[in-house]
Image (tube, helix red, strand yellow):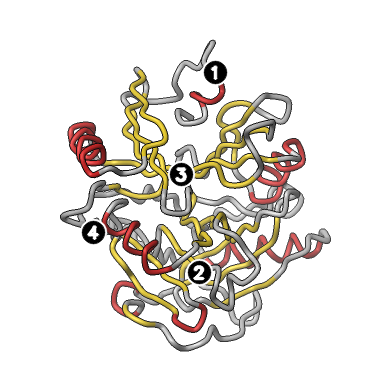
Amino acid sequence: MAVQEHEAAGTAVAAGAGPYYRPRRIGHCNIYVGVLDPSMDFYTNVVGLREAYRRPAINAGFLTNGNTHHDIGMVDVVGPRGRGYTPGLNHLAWELETQIDLVDGFRRAIADGVEYDRTIDHEISHSVYNKDPDGNVNEVYADTRMRWYKDRFGEVRRSNPPWYPGDVEPDGNVNYEIDPEIVRVEGAVFHPVKITGACMVLDDYEAGYAYYTGQIGLSPVVGGADAPYAVLGGTCGLRDLSLFRGRAGRGPGLHHMNFMCAGEEDLERSIARAKRDGVDIVAEIDHPARRALVVASPDRLKINFYVDRGDGLPDLEGLEEERAIYLV
């Protein structure tokens, strides 16, 4: 099943032309969890991702279904990297075409005075990190030539080697899997194809919109800085990020994650199974544009499993925001 829509390499934005990067898509969400083992079990047996690898030194785990090296990463709040945090978002990750795009964008951003918290060689990818105006961490990365499905399973005990963009000549090849083999986790409640988006609630909505469009380089799909909410996408043409304004009863931070399922018939079986098994259901959507079930993890993080019933955005005219938030 081809799920990695491909854009030709060499798409870095020219200096002075606007955003520093042009992400293809959201690559993964990394979250803080209360206890690692039950959370890994939930994301395997309910969400339907298989365990890829763990990093015992930081009490972290990573899961995939073959779409990429991980759709979900998680760090235990009692581990050395999670200490002082509560369950919720660690970071959003944005996948670029090539290492050249990453290094070129980083250099232009630094030249313009943009600040970064860290740069990391993850071996499977090179990454740069900074924060949006609300303080939410974002990772921009490009994969390396390491074949993660051969070399990144089990326990990873070695530390990340030092890396700074441009230290070595960046690779101009496309290193992500163009046509990955999707693995179905038999026995799981859901069977997603891949993570396709995240929904963020922002206190400083206007500044956040400017950050995600002007710095990260996502393109507006619907809404804008003056609208109640906005939907942004990468070059693959998906709806990768929705931004909503914070208000009473809707606090800032990660609202939910979106996982696309293969088909409505399969999703209906999963919905029936979730109800039988007592999965914590937050919302059920049966709209002309989308069939979906939103469930909560053991830490009350929300996951939206969906199948769209048509192309393009749904007609949201007159629809209250609390319903629209799961449709966009």
Mark 1 or 4, closer to the camera: 1
Residue marked by disc 4 = 181
Q: Residue furthest right?
A: 113
The one of 112 and 250 positioned closer to us in this rendering: 250
Q: Mark 3 or mark 1, which has the lower sequence index?
A: 3
Amino acid under label 3? Lys
Q: Quadrant of residue 67?
A: bottom left
Q: Earlier in the sequence, mark 1 or mark 4?
A: 4
Please tell me whether mark 2 sits on a helix, a strand or a loop.
strand
> What element does badge 3 sit on?
strand
Indicate which label's residue lies in the foreground, 1 or 2: 2
From mark 1 to mark 2, how far is it between C-alphas? 35 Å
Q: Which residue is mark 3?
A: 302
Q: Residue at x 57, y 46 (%)?
A: 254
113 or 131: which is nearer to us? 131
Quarter of the view holding residue 146: bottom left
User: Which image quarter: residue 206?
Assistant: top right
Q: CA distance from mark 4 to mark 2?
A: 29 Å
Residue neighbourhood size for the residue with mark 1, other residues' Cα within 10 Å, grouped as few (<14), some (14–19), many (≥20):
few
Q: Is residue 116 left or right of residue 296?
A: right
